[in-house]
Image (cartoon, rainbow, N blue to C red):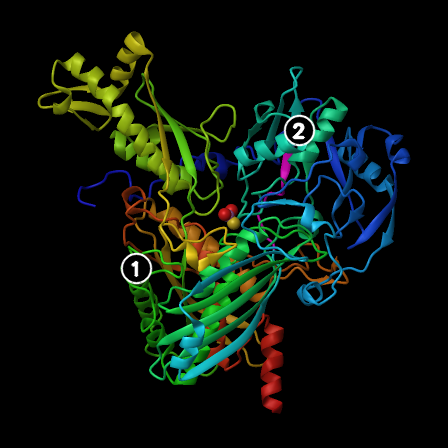
Amino acid sequence: MTTETRVVGKSLPRLDASGKVTGTAVYAADFALPGMLWGKIVRSSEPHARIARIDTERARRMPGVRAVLTAADVPDVRYGGALKDETVFARDKVRYVGQPVAAVAAVTAEAAEAAAAAVEVSYEPLPPVLDLAAALAPGAPLVHEDWRTYTAIPILHRDGNVCNRARIVTGDVERGWAEADRVFAHRFTTAMVHQGYTEPRAAVAAWDSAGQVTVWSNTQLPFEIQNTLAEILQVLPGCVRVIVPGIGGGFGGKLRVGVEHFAVLLARKAGRPVKVLTTSEEELTAAYPRQGTLIELKTGVTRDGRITAKEGRIWFDTGAFAGSGPGVASVATLVLAGPYRIPNLFLEGYAVYTNKTNCGSYRAPSGPQANFAVESQMDMIADALGLDPLEFRLRNIVREGDEGPTGQTLTAVGLEECLLRAAKAIGWENRKPGPWRGKGLACGWWTTTGGSSGVYVKINPDGTVGLNTGAVEIGTAALTGAAQILAEELGVNLADIHVVSADTFATPFDFGAQGSRTAFAVGNACRAAVAELKRKILAQAAAHLRVEPEALALRDRHVVADGTRVSLGEVARLSQLSGGGLIAHGTFIAPPTPYDAKRVEAHVYPAFHSPSFHAHAVDLSVDPETGDITIHRYVVAQDVGFAVNPTYIEGQIEGGVAQGLGQALSEEIVYAGGRVLNANLTDYKMPTTVDVPRVESILVQHPSQVGPYGAKGVGEPPNIEPPAALANAVAAASEVRVMTLPLTAEKIALALRGRERA
Ligand code: MOS
């Protein structure tokens, strides 16, 4: 960047701050309409069973009940993303404990709950597929007998319980093994974990007399939900309006239709607005958590620490439906490659059906699992070769102009700087500063998701600016970041910008709050809008000031020329009098990232756009009696391209690490016999404020060529490295290498006892 900026790059307060801190912001879970009913979902008690009979008579006659629905009452539609295998309610058989089989609406939440409990369902149990090994065994029962008949995007590679097998093949691993002095093979597993958003999934639906339905929900993707609801209802998308009043965290768990379809169908049946809100138990048994995985990694290295080849496979336990599994399995292969120069790669990601809840996307989907394996193994290899883990990484990391695993050209590669600065911050030269104390590192790379964004920008006669966007403010302050870019470009203050967002009827299309893309894409759409708007502003002002448009510039909320100026508001007023006002439509779509298509198979996401690079460094102690971990320092160095608002990027880093610590140390949705044993927030152990250490952020800035002012996506990355960084630090502190997540104190203590006995 060459010129001084006045709004971007500054830690200004977010535009929605006051509503959040005073508690006046309305979230979807708060939203209510007069005369609203409450919906409740009846869920399967069996992991895999034929439905013999559903009797709703008793429920229908209960006081206050206004609607009861089963599969027989709704269109027989299979929907889904890459693979259409879902139905609103189970029809002939259920495939997981928690799968919806019916829904009721009643005048109070209590009446709805009582009616739901009165729906009688008889099941004939079928042999369930309880884990990856069972699903992949020869002759395993099929979760979907009719998988061949389902509609899917044609590139998927499917086979029975495998609903996609994505692959990257680069070079020739056999040659790589021949060139290697040592070959290391390891196996890792990771647990199923929930996103832990504070606001449960919620939706309110109301139909009007013209046959249009409006849904207020906390979805991350209002335009996608509009289409999905239209598909489920068998109506045109133009009949479905989706509005996001506010969203209390999503982290990928609110990408897909959650409870919106139940609200819409119940409201249509009852002729009244209906609200559906999930409980913690429903969240932990029937939401879209992160998949548990099994990972096998084989890596060849020369004696001096150069990686010659890597073969890796990761199996995702995607649960009873494909959901985001085919895509997540694809992305995983890019994470398995790691941010390393490796000439020979054979990497596969499998999405596998089991009789569990349908797993989905969670902040950097596949990132923490695959990175845990890759970065744990990097340390294990370094130890075996007698190399410092930092030095081993520096010998292999990608650098400016290198090729990515699928042939993309990497630019703005800030990885070396991230590694060096994170390591330096924790005093890497002294890796074992005391007994039971050690330091660990992990690094990685991630994408800035593409997809298009549109905005309308309007200048008001009072000089304020309307930013109208289909994007969702998911809580990151990404729309404040976009507004900072808009303010910078227009020469106004951030506080001059008013944001209207996330209404499929009233705002332009946006690909949604996913993949760390919002500030990046909406920011660029704002720049495009200003380019368009400037022509109108300058023409109007030039006529008014009697100067040439070329002599004018936007500065300090004015249009200025040598010795004269007019306020932006006055130009807007003049434009309203003469030509309908100052408004422009700006759009952006990230240019495609070229890659070598011959290297990929069944791959939904073959390249990382405007990739970010990051390193985490941790200094901790292990209690040799209990296995408990005390974190002394946690440092993140993240290449953010350009820090549009440093405070909120630090907020993302702190939040991402907090979630990452949970996945690393304590969180696991525990299944036994197809049932969740810990479906409450007492037994499902998320970290709290007392568990999370201070996180130190180092913002590294190697500007992206595409991002606004050089920005890259920043939201997901901080969630990726915590498990590996902690595992590596635990190994340095205790010589215990835990290869299954979570790294509980119990596992560490048992391993220490085992070693003492040995
Ligand atoms: Mo994200 S897991 O793309 O919300």
Q: Specify whether residue 201 is painted magenta.
A: yes
Q: Residue at x 69, y 58 (%)?
A: 354
Side of 672 relative to 219 (left or right) = right
Q: Main secondary structure of the magenta part?
A: loop
Return the residue at label 2: 234
Q: Is residue 559 above or below residue 143?
A: above
From the top left corner, tell me how far across and down residue 165 is, in percent.
57, 58
Which residue type does callout 1 highlight? Gly
| Relative side of 546 to 436, left or right | left
For the point 42% across and 41% down, the residue is 518
Kind of residue sitting beneath label 2: Gln
| Residue 441, image x, y percentages | 41, 70
Residue visible at 37% across and 69% down?
343
Seen from the viewer's position, the closer of residues 725 and 634 is 725
Location of mark 1 (residue): 414
Res 729 seen here: no
Identify the image quadrant of residue 111.
Answer: top right
Give whichever of discs 1 and 2 has the lower sequence position: 2
Find out whether residue 88 is within the magenta segment. no
Q: What residue is shown at x 40% (from left), y 61% (from top)?
A: 405
Residue found at the very far front of the displayed protein: 598
The residue mark sitting in front, 1 or 2, is 2
Q: Position of residue 722 (x, y in %)?
A: 47, 64
